[in-house]
Amino acid sequence: MATILITGGAGYIGSHTCKLLASVGHLPVAFDNLSNGHADAVRWGPLQTGDICDRRQLRAAFEAWRPESVIHFAGLIEVGRSTADPATFYRANVAGSLALLEEMAAVGLRRIVFSSSAAVYGIPVSSPIPEEAPPAPVSPYGETKRAVEAMLDAFARACGINYAALRYFNAAGADPEGELGERHDPETHLIPRALRTALGLEPELVIFGTDYPTPDATAVRDYVHVSDLAAAHVAALDRLASGGGPLTTNIGTGSGRSVQQVLESCRRISGCRIPARTAPRRAGDPPELVAATGRAARDLGWRPHLSDLDSIIATAWAWHSARGA
Ligand code: UDP
């Protein structure tokens, strides 16, 4: 049994990963400032309340729990807000990650799995996107992810920190056992918004952009089930523990789904009408983001199992409809 410190362990992907880690015999210690996370989502190990920007709190957590690895989810995620308030994003995502890496180096902790994002690619020139595509973020959010990837690389060279940077495509769905799900405030993501509209909690779904060069003119994304994402983190930890070197890899399915297809699946699975209207594109939204999947399969032995669109939406619907939120 290994003790793993999970920054952002009370958040959406973090809490699902804690559950999976516990089920394979590890002790997940959630380190979270609860600014966006939920204390009641930490159920598979202890919660250490703290902020990654505070090195003393990090040091205290390392001393109290002596983890052998870190999975680093903590950070801000709303792309639109990153444009309006870049300072807050650079502080939380870049300065926070720097504090974490410095503190890890100081205590001799050498393994980290980092939540990167397809946002590092910006507007891709081809699809599916291979990891070799040059990073070209179009938002401060994406810039912060690229900056942390560069920092990881520098720390790997300078002090032997070994890392896996996982570039997530669109995380979606909920724990198939119904114990966890997606709870953001504000909720900006397509699937929870559509399902909240199905429940009558929002008056309508707004479809951003109906003039994309895609088959049905709405934007295409690669949706990955959150439990598959959690499994990618466990695979990355295993790789680090067995001496695999630094890795940067996409985590996606290789299949794209349009906003219209998602909406139709939400209607079918919920049995609700889901009123929708169209609006102009959201600034900075690329037409299509679909992962090339070869590296994750080869270097992590990871493949998605639950990420077909209907499984994603059925598990998300079970979660939202049970909570009425
Ligand atoms: N989207 C939409 N209406 C919404 C939320 C999202 O049409 O209320 C679109 C968005 O423009 C993008 C896709 O759905 O093309 C996925 O957006 P989401 O915010 O879920 O994830 P992102 O791809 O931005 O990380």
Image (cartoon, rainbow, N blue to C red):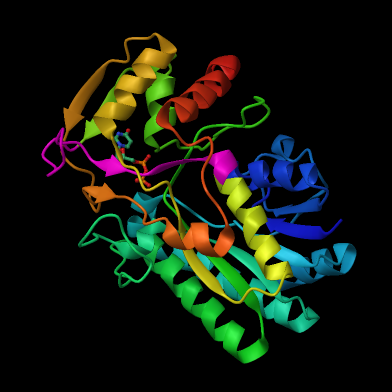
Magenta region, residue range? 209-228
Percent coordinates x, y for residue 234 in the rendering: 67, 54
Residue at position x 31%, y 24% in the image? 263
Q: Quadrant of ligand 1?
A: top left
Residue 36 visible in the shown view: no
Residue at position x 27%, y 33% in the image? 259
175 in relation to 112, above or below? above
Residue 195 visible in the shown view: yes
Q: Is residue 83 magenta?
A: no
Asked whether, in this view, residue 277 is left or right of residue 160, the answer is left
Classify the position of the N terminus by image quarter: bottom right
Residue toward you, 124 or 92: 124
Residue at position x 78%, y 38% in the image? 43
Residue at position x 66%, y 71% in the image? 100
Q: Quadrant of residue 131?
A: bottom left
Residue toward you, 63 or 185: 63
Asked whether, in this view, residue 82 is left or right of residue 230, the answer is left
Q: Is residue 219 magenta?
A: yes
Percent coordinates x, y for residue 251 in the rendering: 47, 54
Asked whether, in this view, residue 265 is left or right of residue 30, the answer is left
Q: Quadrant of residue 242?
A: bottom right
Residue toward you, 273 or 248: 248
